[in-house]
Image (tube, rainbow, N blue to C red):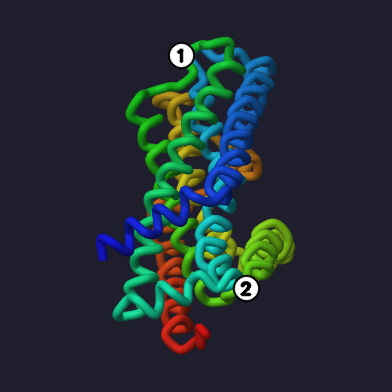
Amino acid sequence: MGALIRAEFRKTFTTNLWWALLIPVAVIGFGAGWMGTTFVGIINSVQQLDRPVPLALLSVAMSANFSTIFGALFGALSVAGEYRNRTITTSFLTSNPRSAVLVAKLIAAAAIGAGYGLVNVLCASLGGLLGASQDLGNFGDIGDWLSVGGTCVLAMVLWTLLGVGFGALVANAVLAIILPLVYKFVVEFIFSMALVGSNVPGIGPYLPGAAGNGIVSNLAVPLFITAVAGPDEPDVPRVAFEVLHVFFGGHYGHPWWASLLTFLAYTAVFVAGGWWANQRRDIA
């Protein structure tokens, strides 16, 4: 197994895929951090607050919502790309059992996903810091910042693992790119809008994209509200939470750990589906 894992890392770092997808993660992270600072600045211009505004919490949440898709694309292409180039044939023929290759890919992808998550958090924090004129007080409590940053890394790892399972399931590089993008930014958005005002609005937080975003946002938004409102946080109107969730993802009143468990279930389903397909697919 150790040799297979090392081989997966060699495959990764001898191609351009990993750093090509890392660039938008860094750029989006920095940009989201900057925009998050601007959004908080607008609030502060309307109502001067007597305490620092922990903008970094929201900046990291926004950057995670837009960046995790690149982790999923990396995971999917790490498998589907090998099917396209037929390089996976040698791996399957020289390893026993065949599922060991998928396990090695999952381990390597988890490590790469964690790296993507760390870059995302650091770039979002840098963007937020520069946008806030280097006011370190706006990062809030260090424990809150580390908690939100940790969930960002965790979300990126899970999206990357889901991508590996999806790539193994479809075994087509074109579909591995198009389907995740279309689903997250088109299909789920339309479905979420259709649920507004319906008799089943509670389904929204359990959709794959919403659950993935909620891992970070359903933690960041309540922490932000608590830090800004102080001990009077229970008196904050619901609309304040809902507005922040519209901009930064997640759903009002839905705990972050429920989003984590929901998305973990989706990840397990796709990994199991990829394993099943790999066991039965011709590789010649």
Q: Residue 251: in sight, yes or no?
A: no
Relative vertical location of residue 248 with respect to residue 211 in this rendering, above or below: above
User: Which one is earlier in the sequence, the residue at label 2 or at label 1?
Assistant: 1
> What number is the disc on residue 172?
2
Q: What's the distance in space between the residues labelled 2 and 1, CA to CA?
A: 46 Å
Q: Is residue 278 left or right of residue 85?
A: left
Q: Position of residue 209 (x, y in %)?
A: 58, 59
Q: Is residue 9 left or right of residue 80?
A: left
Relative vertical location of residue 234 with respect to residue 96 in this rendering, above or below: above
Q: Residue 3: in sight, yes or no?
A: yes
Instruction: Sort mark 1 into few (<14), some (14-19) or many (20+) by Cα contacts within 10 Å.
Output: some
For label 1, the residue is: 136
Label 2 sits on a secondary structure element that is loop
Q: Is residue 16 or residue 154 the one in the foreground?
A: 16
Q: Position of residue 198 (x, y in %)?
A: 69, 68
Residue in view at x 62 percent, y 73 percent: 172
Give the residue type at disc 2. Answer: Asn
